[in-house]
Image (cartoon, rainbow, N blue to C red):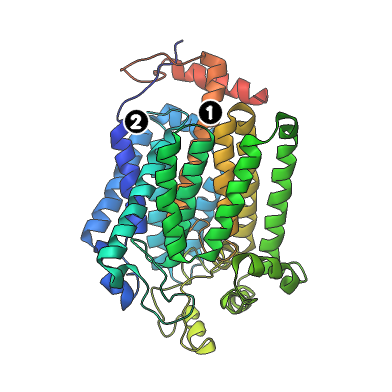
Amino acid sequence: MAWLRDDRHSFFLAGMMWVLIVLMIVPEGFDYQSLTTTGAPSSGGAISRLLWLGLLALSVILIFWRAGLAWLLARTLNPFLLLFVALAVASIAWSIDPALSLRRLIRLGTIVLACMAFVLMSWHARRYQNVVRPILTIVLLGSIVFGLVFPSLAIHQQTSAELVGAWRGLANHKNGLGALSCITLIFWFHAWLTREVKLLPALAGGAVAATCLVLSRSSTSLAATVFVMVFLVMLLRSPHGLRPYMPYLVAMLVAILLIYALAILNLIPGLGTLMAPIAALTGKDMSLTGRTEIWAILSEHIRYHPFLGTGYGAYWTAGPVAGTESYEFVWRMGSFYPGSAHNGYLEIVNDLGWAGLLCLIAYIVTHVRQSLQLLAMDRHQGALYLALFFQQAITNLSETHWFSVLSVDFVIMTLATTALARALLEQRLRLVFGEPQPSTSGPIDGMALPLARKSFTRVQGGGA
């Protein structure tokens, strides 16, 4: 049986991902004026809802159209991503705000399905970064232009020390712009190290990302950028004699990050001692700009629902609403309402309890393991997926991105997870069918799919 390459609808699928990424970055209706008064809206308008429903419908159609390949992909996909979705759906049963959880779940399902649909067609090894890197660069370039033309909207006007003069650009907040800049700079630096792009385009794209990173004044993103860039150099440009030891280095770094995450959750004694290096690295005080007080209040709330949490996305309302459980922050922190835990690990525990945290840790371990598997076959792509993981692991120590449908980081990481699964599946299919042959009629046809499933099971069982 021949394995036929499917190059159809490349621009259409890329357009779907561009729309999804832009929807996650910009405020509803491009209304930046509302950010200076009421903050981000709690629900989308008619156009936004239509776009989200369109993405959901198209994703479902594409997955059913390519059901055979989708089944093989699901068997390779990080199973704890799907388990998290299942746990989040189940949490409606005990959610403190089932309606809010349901709205979050619709967006969660759309993101996961869209990312799965994207990797089913027009796939090649560098497809992921070739689609994501340009749109992130365009958004950052637009942020610079937006800041120059409308500084009152693109630059924070608050008087608090951490926000004075900080740019948010086209994002909702300076930390959002900082995270986007960090990820984009990682993409361009990786592309230059792997010679995917020439020096001048890499310098141009990297300069745009670096400019936004500095303007955002996000010290956490700056620290994550430096760490990940050094990591990429070690992984891609280290002497060949040191490369066999890189998996051990990766495992050690993952262990250290998880220890810090557990320390924040007060599962490990000596939180103050462990937080001191992070405070020094990011240039913040020991309270991490008030985050430790937020964590303390949230930890008290978690003790009432330790095992299953209070429902996915149900705790934080769009603003300080009297009578809600999150309103406690208003009277305990002087009318301050953080809007999130400012820690991705703590947010998961608050939403889904220790069950959710165990799912997150298992997802992390599986992602690293799969990335190391790919690293042995395709060093360049394996390094990229590891780099993006470390960027997320670091920023989630002081920001909320893990499995958050309010953060574009979740889209980028979920797309990385599905792209990683497709890359591993691609390697296994090559062992069965060899190199794919050019075709305009589609990939493995209906007659070949049973053979693909049987051979895939045999190859998977053989440890390939």
Q: Is residue 186 left or right of residue 406?
A: right
Residue of label 2: 65
Q: Position of residue 422 (x, y in %)?
A: 50, 32
Pair 2/1: label in front: 1
Q: Position of residue 223 (x, y in %)?
A: 58, 59
In this picture, is 436 found above or below 318?
above
Helix, strand or loop at mark 1: helix
Name the N-terminal-most of marks 2 and 1. Answer: 2
Q: Amino acid at mark 1?
A: Leu
Q: Quadrant of residue 273?
A: bottom right
Q: Position of residue 70 (x, y in %)?
A: 44, 32
Residue at position x 42%, y 33% in the image: 127
Task: Give residue 425's mark.
Answer: 1
Residue 78 shows in this picture: no
Q: Amino acid at mark 2?
A: Trp
Q: Position of residue 250 (x, y in %)?
A: 69, 44
Residue 191 shows in this picture: yes
Helix, strand or loop at mark 2: helix
Q: Is residue 164 left or right of residue 44?
A: right
Q: Is residue 9 left or right of residue 409?
A: left
